[in-house]
Image: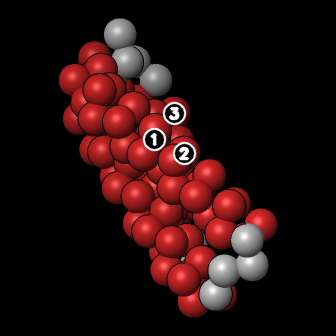
């Protein structure tokens, strides 16, 4: 079972909503809509992906990483992996 199992429904709802938003943005571009309107929609997508990422990251830490540390199974590997993923998401 994945560590995000309890949030899976919420994650899928958010991803489906983002999919709809992306299709809407594609249509806006096809219809030559105003740039700022498109940028506002893209900003919403960025915020939505960050929210989904935060949910999965929290679940990963509370599930996979906690379990690895508690059982001492590949704990160094899990911690290093977590550090890499946090670095990737905090790069600007």
The quarter of the displayed image where residue 70 is located: top left
Of the two numbered discs 3 and 2 in the rendering, the one whose residue sits closer to the viewer: 2
* Residue 68 found in image quarter: top left
Residue where numbered disc 3 is placed? 77
Residue 73 is left or right of residue 29, and the answer is left
Q: Nearer the viewer, mark 2 or mark 1?
A: 2
Q: Position of residue 21 (x, y in %)?
A: 51, 55
Tell me if residue 57 can be seen: no
Q: Are marks 2 and 1 in contact (CB under 8 Å)?
A: yes
The quarter of the rendered structure image containing the C terminus is bottom right
Q: How dense is the environment of label 3, judged by Cα within 10 Å: few (below 14), some, or many (20 and up)?
A: few
Q: Residues within 10 Å of mark 1 (few under 14, many from 20)?
A: some
Disc sitting over residue 24 in the figure: none
Quarter occupied by residue 10: top left
Mark 2 and mark 1: span between their CA atoms?
A: 6 Å
Which residue is pictured at 66% across the width and 80% down the height? Answer: 33
The colouring scheme, among rainbow, by chain, secondary structure or one colour, is secondary structure
Residue nearer the viewer, 92 or 87? 92
Q: Nearer the viewer, residue 64 or 1?
A: 1
Q: Dot 1: what SS? A: helix
Q: Which residue is mark 1?
A: 15
Using the image as rendered, state which of residue 6 and residue 64 is in the foreground: 6
Mark 2 highlights which residue?
Answer: 19
Q: Is residue 5 above or below residue 7?
A: above
């Amino acid at each position: 079972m994945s560590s995000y199992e309890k949030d899976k429904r919420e994650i899928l709802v958010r991803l489906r909503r983002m999919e709809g938003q992306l299709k809407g943005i594609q249509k806006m571009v096809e219809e030559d809509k105003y740039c700022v309107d498109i940028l506002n929609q893209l900003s919403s997508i960025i915020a939505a992906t960050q929210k989904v990422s935060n949910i999965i990251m929290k679940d990963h830490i509370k599930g996979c990483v906690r379990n690895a540390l508690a059982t001492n199974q590949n704990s160094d590997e899990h911690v290093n992996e977590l550090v890499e993923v946090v670095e990737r998401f905090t790069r600007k």
